[in-house]
Image (tube, rainbow, N blue to C red):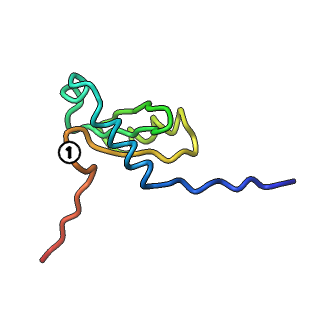
Amino acid sequence: MTQQIQERPDIQEISSKGWRILEALPRKVKEEHFRQFIAIDVDSGNYFIGDTAIEATRKAQAKYPGKVFFLGRIGYRTAYTFKGRR
């Protein structure tokens, strides 16, 4: 029995493709889903929208189990920000 070695995803490529797909979303989608999270399968271009990151990711995983997705937030530069004390 041979074990398949899963290829490590290229995170830079996923990020780059994901941003292009997110930026190319139709204006109507951006307006209707402003502030919602989006999980994008960069190979197919399919995207999944949810009120939370978990919801969007679970929708994507249901269709593409085991894949790595680009996660963003519609209308924002990042999905999350981290602020600490100074």
User: Horizontally, is 19 left or right of 1 in the view?
Assistant: left
Residue found at the far left of this picture: 86
> Residue 5, located in which quarter of the rendered image?
bottom right
Residue at horizontal 36 percent and vertical 46 percent from the top: 71
Residue at horizontal 38 percent and vertical 42 percent from the top: 18
Q: Position of residue 49 (x, y in %)?
A: 34, 33
Q: Where is residue 6 in the image (x, y as percent from the top left)?
A: 65, 53
Q: Where is residue 28 in the image (x, y as percent from the top left)?
A: 22, 22
Location of residue 82 with respect to 33 vertically, above or below:
below
Residue found at the far bottom of this picture: 86
SS type, badge 1: loop
Location of residue 74 with respect to 16 vertically, above or below:
above
Residue at horizontal 57 percent and vertical 57 percent from the top: 8
Most foreground residue, 43 or 84: 43
Most foreground residue, 70 or 82: 70
Location of residue 27 with respect to 4 vertically, above or below:
above
Number of disc labels: 1
> Residue 73, located in which quarter of the rendered image?
top left
Identify residue for label 1: 76
Residue at horizontal 29 percent and vertical 31 percent from the top: 24
User: Horizontally, is 16 left or right of 85 in the view?
Assistant: right
User: Horizontally, is 77 left or right of 46 in the view?
Assistant: left
Q: Looking at the picture, which amino acid does disc 1 mark? A: Tyr
- The quadrant the C terminus occupies is bottom left
User: Horizontally, is 3 left or right of 49 in the view?
Assistant: right
Location of residue 76 with respect to 45 vertically, above or below:
below
Report crowding for label 1: few under 14, some 14 to 19, many 20 or more residues within 10 A (C-alpha).
few
Residue found at the far top of this picture: 28
